[in-house]
Amino acid sequence: MSSVSTTPKRTADIVRRTLESEIVSGALGPGERLDETVLARRFEVSRTPVREALMQLTSGGLIEMRPRQGAIVATVTAKQLFEMFEVMSELEAQCAKFAARRMTTTEHEALRNAIKACQAAADKGSADAYYDANRSFHEAIYAGSHNSFLEQQTTALRNRLSGYRRIQLHRGARILSSLNEHKQVLAHILAGDGDSASSAMRGHVMIQGDGFIDLLSSLNLGDSAQSRVGT
């Protein structure tokens, strides 16, 4: 890979995204060691952005820092992944329910703008741009819940699952279906219908049957589970 001529923060982000994609796709397997020096040589950068990228991946749970071993790709079973997404769907559903009751007019406008950004990314067919816009949409709802503890817990788990959620956007027509689900959630929030907003968000985060099985197959995880996973 050629050297990256950009800001340290941007360089760290590029390294993180590349490693994140390789971990989630299985190119970097569970237990594999990530050596800072080797990575710095590979990306033709200093060790500083590499170290920052590894810290971000550690906070997201994709890698672990072990004594005398350094950074190691974390092991995540299908059962663990299912359980995390199951909790994620409930946290996001609660955020949507509170947001429908508590969001201000200004926050409604911010949510509409987030949907516009999602639409623009979908029109371009850019999974990366859609992921960023999608994240802004969800985070606007977390903030709109006006419950800081709920917002913090939901954000923390979303960060843990970010790599797995990102990969879903590269599968079939997921971007378009995700966008339509966003619009349903938005409509219920703007209408102040907390129960419907909660139900729509829960369904949005959890995709029926085959999507999850396909994801597990692509990740080569060590066990199986039947559930629903979404973005």
Image (cartoon, rainbow, N blue to C red):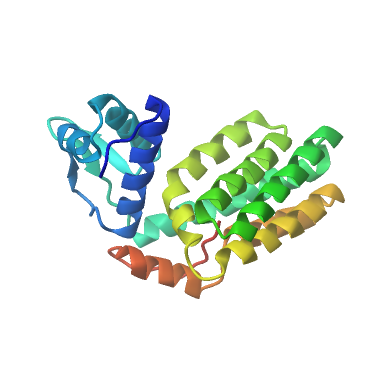
Residue name at image x 81 percent, y 54 percent: 188
Q: Where is residue 83 in the image (x, y as percent from the top left)?
A: 45, 55
* Residue 29 lies in quadrant: bottom left
| Residue 116 visible from this viewpoint | yes
Q: Is residue 1 left or right of residue 230?
A: left
Q: How many marks?
A: 0
Q: Which residue is drawn at 42% across and 32% down?
A: 10
Can you say which quadrant of the picture contains the C terminus? bottom right
Q: Where is residue 37 in the image (x, y as percent from the top left)?
A: 16, 32
Judge by depth and name the residue closer to the eye, 90 or 12: 12
Q: In this view, does 81 lie to the left or right of 104?
A: left
Q: Residue at x 46, y 52 (%)?
A: 84
Image location (x, y in percent) of residue 119? 68, 55
For the point 28% across and 46% down, which residue is it?
Answer: 74
Residue reaching furthest to the bottom = 210
Q: Is 185 placed left or right of 162 in the picture? A: right
Farthest residue, direction left = 68
On screen, 26 above or below 113?
A: below
Image: 65 above or below 174 = above
Task: Say whether residue 65 is left or right of residue 184.
Answer: left
Q: In which quarter of the image is the N terminus?
A: top left
Q: In which quarter of the image is residue 153?
A: top right
Foreground of the two, 197 or 176: 176
Report if residue 91 is visible in the image: no
Residue 221 percent across, percent down from the top left: 30, 63
